Amino acid sequence: MKVLVLGVGKMGYGLLKDLDAQPHVDEITAADMNTEQAQAYAERVGGDKTTVVKLDATDKRETVKLMKSGFDVVASALPRPFCDAAVEAAIESGVGYADVAAGFDTIFSQNEDAEKAGVTVVPHIGLDVGTDRVLCGVGARMLDHTDGMTVWCGGFPQRDTPGYRNPLRYKISWYWPYAVDTNLRTSTVLIDGETVTIENLSDPEEVTFPEPIGKTEAFTTGGLADVIHHLGLEGVKTAVGKTVRWPGHCETWTTLKRLHLLDQEPIKVKGAETTPYDMFVALGYRHLQYGPEEGDAICQRVEVTGTRDGEATAYIYEFIDLHDFENDISAMARTTAYPCSVVAQMIAAGEFDRPGVVHPAWIGYDEGLSDRFFEELASRGIEMTEYVKRPLK
């Protein structure tokens, strides 16, 4: 199998790491504008499968030319602004594609073109968004009728590490500006049959995960309307996505906002124009990087409620993951890049029988694809626990 990896940063490294470990993957091409960084990540992976090439993903002609050079599939860790163009190039090249970041609000406009080209595209199959949507699909498949779904997911420094003890109790494990923006938006969600808008950080709740994580804090950061739409579910009354952080997160970030340290209105400082937001992001890049002996943690819980055989039933799926020091990879990279790598390999192997842009929830809704997906994740040490709640007779 010959795989093209687009974008070689923290998550691209995870793609290279997983693909290099698969015996059936013979060649990997890592494409990025920053070839020095890409080469460093490739050398960190080791082995002799990976070749680094320079590519400007905004140059469609060059991207198509590269994609047409014999690849079985494309696995992309490009940031969201570049994903739509990458998908368009993959469709034109006739090559299957999976990524960790495409926006659902735009990417499905290419579904018809993908179907006509006979190309399977699975967008945003990472952690959250990604595996959470697959689990929503599994829960919906298990129920006769679905009336609610809630996702809790987060990544942060492991407890009692330097990152845990810093004022934010956070360090950078993925695209930092998006992590900041999570605290600045409002979210439109479905609660008890009503569409409501919630200001992020305004509704903290205590959520407890298995050790070594324990007590956390979650707050609403998005809806799950995409799952409802793509699975054609009717009668869903609640659909909410929540971000998980260490306790105190909402209070800390609310204070930062009230101090105007995250404002995006330009100001002049000693004759130079900038924004408090840009300064904050730049300082984060400087001071919030993980040290060599620090590790991150990931937690995710998905609850899908409804009825089965006439009884109120809930399916709950949960997992945690920790930085893998032995294999030199973060929990965030494992749980974001590995699902994308698995799906890309499934596409290349012809395991998807439908061309087009395929929403991740459909993987969970299809028993065969779901079983393969979770079997592959389990083989990489990412194992889900399932709980079922129903009336005791």
Image: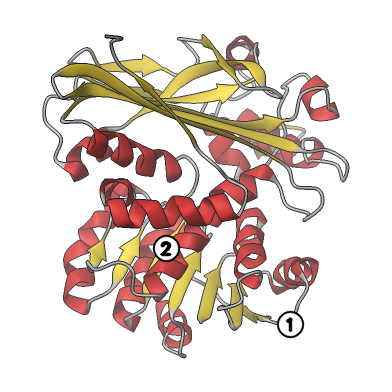
Q: Position of residue 246 (x, y in %)?
A: 65, 19
Instruction: Please name the residue shown 36% across and 44% down the image.
Output: 134
Numbered disc 1: secondary structure: loop
Callout 1 crowding tier (Cα within 10 Å): few <14, some 14–19, many ≥20: few
Q: Are marks 1 and 2 in contact (CB under 8 Å)?
A: no
Q: In this view, does 64 lie to the left or right of 205?
A: left
Residue 128 visible? The answer is: yes
To which quarter of the image does residue 297 belong? top right
Q: Is residue 340 left or right of residue 198?
A: right
The vertical placement of 43 against 241, above or below, is below
Q: Quadrant of the C terminus?
A: top left
Q: Residue 48 carries which label?
A: 1
The vertical placement of 47 against 181, above or below, is below
58 or 95, nearer to the observer: 95
Numbered disc 2: secondary structure: strand
Q: Position of residue 176 (x, y in %)?
A: 62, 40
Disc 1 from disc 2: Cα separation: 23 Å
User: Outermost residue toward the front?
Assistant: 393
The vertical placement of 381 against 213, above or below, is below
Q: Is residue 108 left or right of residue 6?
A: left
Query: Earlier along the polypeptide chain: callout 1 or callout 2?
Result: 1
Q: How many labels does the image show?
A: 2
To which quarter of the image does residue 346 belong? bottom left
Q: Which amino acid does label 2 sit on?
A: Ala
Instruction: Please name the residue shown 50% across and 43% down the image.
Output: 127
Q: Residue 98 carries which label?
A: 2
Callout 2 crowding tier (Cα within 10 Å): few <14, some 14–19, many ≥20: many
244 or 342, nearer to the observer: 342
Q: Where is residue 392 in the image (x, y as percent from the top left)?
A: 31, 9
Q: Position of residue 315 (x, y in %)?
A: 35, 27
